[in-house]
Image: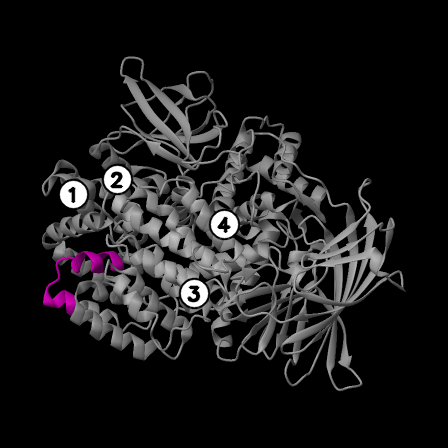
Amino acid sequence: MTLSAAAEPGAEDAYAPPPFEIPHASLWIDLQRDVARVRAELRFRRARVGVTDLVLDGVGLRLAEARLDGQVLADDRLTHSSHGLVLAAAPDEGVLALDYELTVGSAGQEGLIRLGEALITHCEPEGFRRICYFPDRPDVMTAFRCTLAADPEAFPDLLCNGALVEAGELPDGRRYAVWDDPRPKASYLFALAAGRFDKLEDRFVTRSGRGVRLGIHARSQDLPWCRHGLAILKQAMAWDERAYGREYDLDDLNVVVLPSYPGGAMENRGLNLYATEFFLADPAISTDEQMRRVSAVIGHEYFHNWTGNRVGCRSWLDLGLKEGFTVLRQQQFMADLAGADEARIDDVIQLREVQFPEDDGPLAHAPRPAAAAVPSNLYSRTIYDKSAEIIRMLATLAGPAASRRISDAFFARLDGRAAAFETLFDIAEEVAGLDLAQFRRWIRAVGGFHVTAAWTWDPASKRFSLTLEQSVRTVTDHPNPGPLLAPVRVGMVGPGGQALAFRSADQSGPLATEQVLELREGRQTFVLEGLAAPPVPSLFRGLSSPVRLTTALDPGELAILARYDGDPTNRWDAAQTLARRAVSERLRLGPGGHIQLVWRDLFDDLLAQAAEAPGAVGRALTPPDDRALGLELSDADPEALAQAQHALAAEMTPRVRDRLRAVHARLAGAAVTDEGVGARRLRAVCLWQLMQAPEPQDLARCRSQLDSPRMAEACAALSQLVACDAEAAKAALAVAFERWRAVPQALDQWFAIQATVGPQAADRVEALIGHSDYRLDNATRVKAVFDAFVLNMRGFHRADGAGYRIVARIVVALNPGNPRLAARFLKAFGDCERFDAARRAHANEALIGILAQPGLAKPVESLARDLLSAGSLAV
């Protein structure tokens, strides 16, 4: 596969630093609706001997004139092609001035594009070459000064990176603005925005006393929904100062929010760019999950100012350094914002249900790949989430104090430079005295990290022997890197729920209720002593390593952990594991099995704790979704699993119906408050359970909740009504549409819910793409439908292949104007290999059909070929 081209684990990938540096670039950009005229002055200097030609990337640019140190260049010195320019026999240093013109692109493209009436840039990873002739690679760090000029009637607001140092009127009546960013940055971080925006202003005072002007720029109808995002931005700035000592370095931080921004969210220095879905948020139009997603994304983009912008990545193959470190910082921020227990469970769900399948599918690749044919296809959950887990493990091994020393040294030494992923490990070894030779294998390993745990208990010696056996499994032919070093956070729970103290037999000192073991060998036994009672082991607490863990825990032991484990993540995980196994047993054996009875008793016990801990109970009792159910049986029919889950719940509901109704009613007041996240989660669980075997009173309760002023409550009700029956769905959807149609962000929920629920979603999606409020050029609306649909296991993986055909059509339709979005949906086919031969045949046919289309964009063609060539879809 392209992303994971074979290389010896730990081998140094071929890398050559840029032969020329561009320490400073001045751009003068005359903006018009369809074209822009540009004058670029690039100050260059030789950085590496042996290369005489200065090579500049450039796509779609029309060169008018080129001058070297003021002299017009002769044709024999300058070679011009569709890929850029080559200056032959370049001097050691000089100034290259270029006059050229470019065409403004459409919304789904890279470079300078038009969104509605605004002009905006989308440069990551290789869009700057469509704006300027430049060595467009992330390790060329440049200080930019940019002058924008435009008709003030069309583009009254002119924004760019850095600080506004001059503005005025030109003799012909156009306005100009000069922006200067004094610190060097990679070219993909260049940004501009020109248009007519309403503005929300505020101020942030840094810990050193500097005032930073904050400006949120958006359409007038969107600005009222930006206040939450502005508040989160200020919280992120303050948090980064407290947690990492990182202060914002510019006097201005501008944010532009526009519908369908193709970058989703982008961290450009001093000018962050957002699609509305990642910045607009309010309880009236957003669910709790969306509110948290907006908070996490805003934090993520702000934290990039240090992890990504001021410290860059050496090549796109090192993307996991900037993204993984930033995701970790985002996760830590959300732990402070939403609570550590809640936030970590969210991280684990994302990892298990999205990244783990990628690791075990045909698109598996290393966090630091050896090669990549298409840089835009590197933006994967492995790069983001698994890289974050690797850096989290490093922090666990180092400890809190040493971790802070490592990050301080990382920022101090690399500020203004581009770094390799390995550089972080180099600094950690030096600063914290760690030996990371084995740990480094993580970034080269392709595939899922699996551990099987077995144990014995000796009551005479009160010793517990824990044997862990590890392996890295992948569907690719990438060589196994050898045993990985993984931190294993361990606790022990007694039969009565008490936390048991212990220590490793090879250590002295006091007993403790938790310890971090280091798994280094393929098979390794740890002897733990001092235990006062037979223990139930709680392994990999907080998911201390990104592991697929197989244990011999029986249903009763899982129930003990679900009731009493001192680690909230493992307590939640034990309950969810028991729920999945109960569904699996119901599918295989029918009603009344042992696991189902244990799950029923646990459900009753936890529901009785609803008043004391609604959030934790709601988390534990949330029914596993289609993706989570698929973790139990790799070859199971998703529809059969869903039917088994429904049958199990329908059998349980009559026993607890009165209590479910009572809990749902008791939490109604809390559920409409800003602090009522836990109450809303548990009410959603109660409503789901009731609607598996509804009585008229329950249907009325659900319809009543649809009228809630909070979007989270209304969406929970609408989802159940859509799943209930055709008449209930039709009426509920009509009510919700009339209420939400005036606010695009709310209407996106209406579209997404219909794509989320059940196998009939495939038919609903067919109808939705013909709806008058659905347009292919509205990327936010398209994502609302298809991001939901490809995660709907029963809909996307429907047995007749309808789901595959629908997604294939949207991939082909998006390819000409928005190939990156097309590739995003195409990645969903990577999950198809887990299913039966008939489904794989349908998926195979859909992929072949995509490849038969003329004019496929490179990201789409490359992904489709990777999916087919991996062989997992062959039948």
Per the model, the C-alpha gap separating discs 4 and 1 is 39 Å
What is the secondary structure assignment of the residue under circle 3? helix
* Residue type, mark 3 in image: Ala
Q: Position of residue 247 (x, y in %)?
A: 66, 54
Which of these two is toward me, 759 or 811? 811
* Residue type, mark 1 in image: Leu
Q: For the residues carrying marks 3 and 2, which lies nearer the camera in this image?
A: 3
Q: Position of residue 714 (x, y in %)?
A: 29, 68
On residue 633, the disc is 2
- The magenta region covers 683-700
Q: For the residues carrying marks 2 and 4, which lies nearer the camera in this image?
A: 4
* Residue type, mark 2 in image: Leu
Per the model, the C-alpha gap separating discs 2 and 4 is 30 Å
Q: Is residue 634 magenta?
A: no
Which of these two is toward me, 843 or 268? 843
Mark 1 is surrounded, within 10 Å at the Cα level, by few (under 14), some (14 to 19) or many (20 or more) other residues, namely some
**In contact (CB < 8 Å): disc 2 and disc 1:** yes
What is the secondary structure assignment of the residue under circle 1? helix
The earlier-in-sequence mark between 4 and 1 is 1
Residue at image mark 4: 862
Residue at image mark 3: 813
Residue at image mark 1: 587
Which of these two is toward me, 628 or 108? 108
On residue 297, the disc is none
Picture layout, residue 683 above or below residue 90 = below
